[in-house]
Image (tube, grey):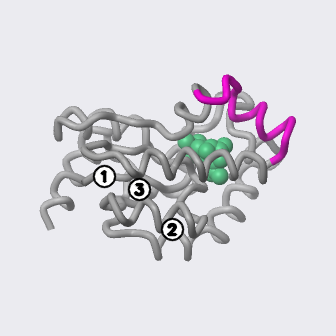
Amino acid sequence: MNVALYGFMAVGKTTVGVILAERLGYAFIDLDTVIVQRTGREIKDIFQEDGEEAFREIEKRVAGDIASGDRQVIACGGGTVLFEENLRNLRISSTLIHLTADPRTILERVEGEGDVRPLLNVEDRLRKLNQLLQVRQPGYQRAADHTVDTTGKTPRQVADEVMEALKH
Ligand code: S3P
């Protein structure tokens, strides 16, 4: 079995995932990092040069490969579970944990990051963030085995809550 952490950008999928993997004695796999390793390109460059659709195709291949592994904590990208094929593959092998945070918290976390998040590379980030959250909410909710809110919590507290959720 795997544990797949998913949710909007900057909810802490990677940070919490590392802690969780250590606690469970699982390998930690960050989907975006594997994409960068396999393609030899940064995510933002794939978006900029080839477009989002091309990125989603790569993401599907890599997510499928990763989902076939075992005893892994997988940090998904923010859009991964919104695509049916990815969700289907992940469901077979993984408990799906939805991490959430309120929009202001997300904004605070992405402020000062520069342009590393291509979908938030716009003038009015809060507006874009709210738009994206609203569109994605149904898909995020539908995919969840468990949901853990991260607002105002440390990564360790979130990891504790995920561990607790995994018992049920
Ligand atoms: C995306 C989130 C990013 C990355 C890509 C697309 C999204 O991952 O996969 O930029 O669609 O929300 P993070 O959530 O790790 O930033």
Query: Residue 166's spot in the image, x, y percent?
Result: 19, 59
Q: Is any part of residue 107 visible from this angle?
A: no
Q: Above or below — where is 29 with respect to 83?
A: above
Where is residue 11? Give x, y as percent.
Answer: 47, 48
Which amino acid, by three-letter code, is at mark 2? Answer: Tyr
Quick check: can you spot residue 47? Answer: yes
Looking at the image, is mark 1 or mark 2 earlier in the sequence?
Answer: 1
In this rendering, would 120 be left or right of 72?
Answer: right
What stretch of residues is rendered in magenta? 38-51
Q: Nearer the viewer, mark 1 or mark 3?
A: 1
Q: Which residue is mark 1?
A: 3
Magenta span: chief secondary structure: helix
Tell me: 84 left or right of 21.
Answer: right
Judging by the rendered image, the residue that carries numbered circle 3 is 99
User: Which numbered disc covers residue 140?
Assistant: 2
The numbered mark at residue 137 is none
